[in-house]
Amino acid sequence: FYPSSTWISDYWPKGIGFYKWLASKGWDEAESLKLAGGTRGSKVHAAIEYLEFQKNLPIETQFTNPNTNQPEDLTEEELFCIAGFHKWFLKVNPQMLASELTVFGDGYAGTLDRIYKIDNDIWIIDFKTSQQIWVNMELQISSYNNASIDYKNLGIKEEAWKRRKMAILQLGYRLNKASWKFTEIEDKFELFQLAKIIWKNENPDSKPKQRDYPLIFKI
């Protein structure tokens, strides 16, 4: 069992901007917004994957809410995110090399969103539906970049892989007219490793919960 890149990265301080936002919202409201953001992100990820593989996405298509495990219509906010991805895709015309790829690093694991070939460059890209990029997001994608990836099996040549780049693609971005923002990320794997030390200190006996059940219930 391995802890996730996201879990480890969240132990890195998010900075004064985040804590000012947290103070302005209060703990309960911030948790509600976090839950809503997670739901939005999950549905948007699923919808984008559907669009890329099926080549079309009727807006009445339903996707599962991870909190209720029930299919739901896409909200206006989720559709706005998908529209942003659609605009970016048509503008950039990326070639997908990997989608939702689970990767393993030194004592951690994670699932990267995409590996694309854009023009002659290889990009590891993480989709976000937030309006800000926090440092923990940069650590998360850096961990993917330094994980063990069988790039040759993805049809990537060694020379191109050595020149690979990372980016965060913000979808539903409201601070420009494009509704998306593409930001290249510098590798911050050293900071991720420090976050892993903090995570280990706070979770010394971390392991999945296990429960025992009888093979047959009788009354």
Image (cartoon, helix red, strand yellow):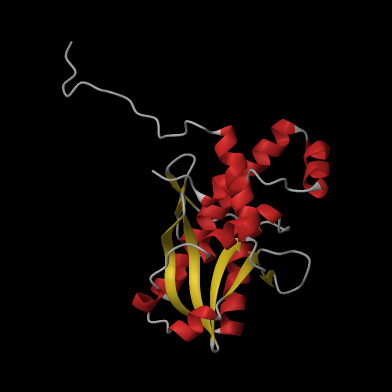
19 or 49: which is nearer to us? 19
Residue 172 is left or right of residue 68, and the answer is: right
Quarter of the rendering containing residue 21: top right
- Residue 218 in the image: state x and y as whole percent: 16, 14
- Residue 7 in the image: state x and y as whole percent: 55, 45
- Residue in the picture at 73% in, 32% down: 27
180 or 79: which is nearer to us? 180
Question: How many numbered discs?
Answer: 0
Image height of 97 relative to 203, above or below: below
Image height of 74 relative to 21, above or below: below
Question: Which image quarter holds the C terminus?
Answer: top left
- Residue in the picture at 50% in, 53% down: 73
Residue 143 is left or right of residue 69, and the answer is: right
Quarter of the rendering containing residue 166: bottom right
Q: Residue furthest bottom?
A: 120
- Residue 98 in the image: state x and y as whole percent: 42, 71
- Residue in the picture at 52% in, 79% down: 162
Image height of 111 relative to 86, above or below: above
| Residue 94 in view in this figure | no
Question: Which image quarter holds the N terminus?
Answer: top left
2 or 194: which is nearer to us? 194
Image height of 118 relative to 73, above or below: below
61 or 112: which is nearer to us? 112
- Residue in the picture at 83% in, 43% down: 20
| Residue 11 in view in this figure | yes
Q: Residue furthest top?
A: 219
- Residue 72 in the image: state x and y as whole percent: 48, 49
